[in-house]
Each structure stands twice: as structure tokens, then as C-alpha cells.
Amino acid sequence: MPEILLERRPGGIAIVRLNRPEVRNALNLTIRQEMATAFRDLAEDATLRCVVLTGNERAFAAGADIADMSRIDAIEMYHRHTERLWAAVGDCPVPVIAAVNGFALGGGLELAMHADIIIAGRSAKLGQPEVKVGIMPGAGGTQRLTRAVGKFRAMLLCLTGEAISAQEAHAMGLVSRVVEDDEVLEAALQMAQKIAEMPPIAVAQIKEVILAGMDGPLSTALALERKAVQVLFASKDKAEGMTAFLEKRKPQYSGN
């Protein structure tokens, strides 16, 4: 069985599903490679509008595969260059929504943080427990987490290895929305559909400017924002969106 399942939905929506249920979708090298291939292929599709990344009802991903990691040394870890595999998710040109049920721990939480929006089930548990097995987060857990929730909460999660509830994660700004467990995927798909109906160039510019600007000086980030707005004023979708608003009708965006 493939360790990544890819499903295409109408309207330019794709579902990428982790498929190692016997180990709660633990992230070994194979599943990371298959996931990177899936995202790279999707990135070449001009009709793509939004991606939903998910696992199953028991786990989004319960972390890295400890059995796999226990057998490798530092040099093999270096040669794997897993940062290139993670980048395929983070560099996806369209919005990525992580639909999280069950456990999102360690590498699982780091994977969710590569998405743009996180929707979590009420019973989900999130955390960075790597310190409990003698290592530390290595795929953005110390950096993306700090940027999402601040130094003191990131220190708490990384230094204690404690898992937190979806509600706690939402309160600290780590999760975008909390829904009932059996509504997670549907809520993610509804959000994906809403995004897919927006003008594609505007959506792409919003994602690009937020990601590029968040770590730069405010003056630089605001300059990026202004330039992106100016570019959008040359798009046909800008004219269509404003005309439709004035005519009180639903816009028909073309992506031009």
C-alpha cells in the first residue's frame, strides 16, 4: 500500500492523506519522500487551488518513526537531507490546510505547522515530545512554534515534551479552528472550497506576502504588501471582482 494517498476533488482541491495507520502515521523516510513527491507534482498543476493534508481519525501523525531513527547515526541523518522533503509542503504555491485528528506530536506537529491553516478536532493532542527520547525538534519545531506562540510557550512545550489539547493550542494561536472530531475533514474541505472560489492570483499573493514578510522588518514587509496590491490592480480578476460587487452578483474568477 502506498504510504501517501492522493485524492482530487472538483474545483481544484486535493487531499493528501498519510497512510500508515498501524503506527499512527509515524513519519519514516519513505512516507516523507512520497509526501514530497505528491506535493511537488501538485505544485505543477495550474488548476490546483487548495490542498488538505490529513491523516486518519486516530492520528494526524504521531511523530517521527522512533524505530527508524534509533538505527541511524548523525552522518546518515545528514545525508537524508529531510529538510528538502519538508520544503515541498511549505513551498506549496497554494494554501495548505492541515486537518488534524488525534495525535499531532513531534514531527507530526512540525508537519502541521508547514501548512497555512490548522483545523483540529476537539480531542486532538499536539506537542513536541522529542526531548523525552534524548533529542529535540529538528523540522521547525523550535522555530515555527516560537513564531506561532511566542518564546515562553514554545519553551514550555519543547523543554517538557508535554502534549496540549486542541483548545489550548487554539488559545495560544497554534490552531486556526477547533471543531468536533467527526467534522474535521469536512470543515477543512469546506474551507478549501471557500478559498478555491477566491481569485487565485490574490490568494497566491496573500500567502506569499504573509510568509515572506513575517520574519522581516515591518518596513520591508509593508513594501512587499504594497507591491503585491499594485500587481493585483493589473489583474482581470480585480476588475471582475469589483464589477461583480457593484452589480450585486457572484464573481467569476479566471485566475488572470
Image (cartoon, rainbow, N blue to C red):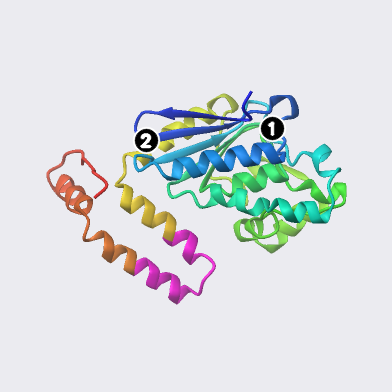
The answer to whether residue 210 is above or below residue 67 is below
Residue 207, given in percent of the width and then of the height, sits at 43, 54
Instruction: Read off the residue under disc 2.
Output: 12
Query: What's the distance in space between the residues labelled 2 and 1, CA to CA?
Result: 26 Å
Image mark count: 2
Can residue 218 be found in the magenta stretch? Answer: yes
Q: Is residue 55 left or right of residue 255?
A: right
Quadrant housing residue 12: top left
Relative to the observer, which residue lies in front, 144 or 68? 68
Residue 114, given in percent of the width and then of the height, sits at 58, 49
Mark 2 or mark 1: whose residue is earlier in sequence: 2
Q: Amino acid at mark 2?
A: Gly
Q: Residue at x 31, y 39 (%)?
A: 197
Q: Indicate which disc residue 1 carries.
A: none
Q: Residue at x 43, y 47 (%)?
A: 94
The magenta span reads 209-226
Give the class, few, some or many, for how many residues have Cα within 10 Å of label 2's Cα (few <14, many ≥20): some
Q: Residue at x 61, y 49 (%)?
A: 86
Instruction: Read off the residue under disc 1.
Output: 25
Q: Residue at x 61, y 48 (%)?
A: 85
Can residue 9 be seen here? The reply is: yes
- Asked whether the beta carbons under mark 2 and mark 1 sit within 8 Å of each other, the answer is no
Can residue 125 be seen here? The reply is: no
Can residue 125 be found in the magenta stretch? Answer: no
The answer to whether residue 220 is above or below residue 3 is below
Q: Secondary structure at mark 1?
A: loop
The answer to whether residue 75 is above or below residue 19 is below
Quadrant housing residue 142: bottom right
Q: Quadrant of the N terminus?
A: top right
Q: Is residue 28 left or right of residue 68?
A: left
Q: Amino acid at mark 1?
A: Asn
Quadrant housing residue 67: top right
